[in-house]
Image (tube, rainbow, N blue to C red):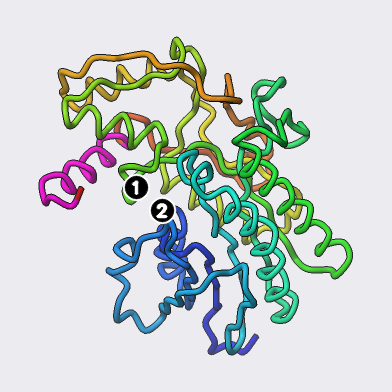
Amino acid sequence: MAKDRKLVSVVTGGSGFLGSHLCDYLLGKGHQVIAIDNLITGNVTNIEHLAGNENFQFIKHDVTNYITVPGDVDYIFHFASPASPIDYLELPIQTLKVGSLGTHKALGLARAKNATFFLASTSETYGDPLVHPQPETYWGNVNPVGPRGVYDEAKRFAEAMTMAYHRYHGIDTRIVRIFNTYGPRMRPNDGRVVPTFIMQALKGEPLTVFGEGDQTRSFCYVSDLIEGIYRLAMSRECDPTNIGNPNEMTVLQFAEVIIKLCNSSSKIVNKPLPTDDPKVRRPNIDKARKILGWEPVMNLEDGLQSTIAYFKNLLEKGLI
């Protein structure tokens, strides 16, 4: 690489929650960034602050179609995909296509550009796990024909495709398995527990807890996740790596925390559990600690306060 040339990174899904934060981080590291998104779940407001930045470019494009990017490319971060239960239940075929065809097209671009390919995979590859916490060596417990299977299997296929390109074509690849992440720029109505509970609490509506609320989750703040992703991208580790927060709590406990932090009078109501809803979810991050020197640093209360302030601002401005 010429010494006077900036690193060039392509981020598919670049206007989404995680993709937009990744774009910000890469720009801060001196990269030129090309964000690609078809906007079916992404939002240009997440990247509007980058308008006019000479090191940033946005391309509206569906990555399940052939991807053309002129010039040199050093990294391809494949983050394009519906990522919440509401999204992939409403967009099942698009979810499968971006995990299969989209991954294939993005890998083809990596091969053509001799670029490092980085796949944003998910803890959902573990399904409803029978091993707890989940290490990268666990193969998972996934129902391929259930309603959640379109997302779980799309990501499992994407991992297999990535490793096939790594082994057969010698592509330099990375795979991150992302656990529950939260922070500003989440969509208020995306169906995930953090924005759902916060919006219900801010509006004084009942918080809907599925089942008895004894299923567990762990929550990683977005800045911690992006730091881990960058460290993994700059490493030489090609096998899947968990990035998430290992601090675990029940959904009921989490609902109570949200009510308290929002200073809300909301009550909690129970609804039936969705099909194949995981009973436990907690990453084993021993590998990330060892090979990346990474672990989360943001405590839950501070991260939630920042996220609550973001949603409160949207409400006050009448944007939601």
List x then y, in percent, for residue 271: 40, 16
Q: Residue at x 24, y 37 (%)?
A: 308
Q: Which mark is residue 258?
A: none
Q: Which mark is residue 187?
A: 1
Packing grade of label 2 (10 A; few <14, some 14-19, many >=20) is many
User: Is residue 269 or residue 134 the one in the foreground?
Assistant: 269
Labels 2, 1: front one = 1
Left/right of residue 103 with respect to residue 313 in the rendered view = right
The residue under label 2 is which amino acid type? Phe
Q: Magenta stretch: give its range.
A: 303-319
Q: Is residue 298 magenta?
A: no
Q: Residue at x 49, y 45 (%)?
A: 90
Q: Where 58 falls versus 244 (above or below)? A: below
Q: Which mark is residue 17?
A: 2
Tags 2 and 1 touching, CB below 8 Å = yes
Q: Earlier in the sequence, mark 2 or mark 1?
A: 2
The residue under label 1 is which amino acid type? Arg
List x then y, in percent, for residue 63: 58, 69
Left/right of residue 52 with respect to residue 284 in the rendered view = left
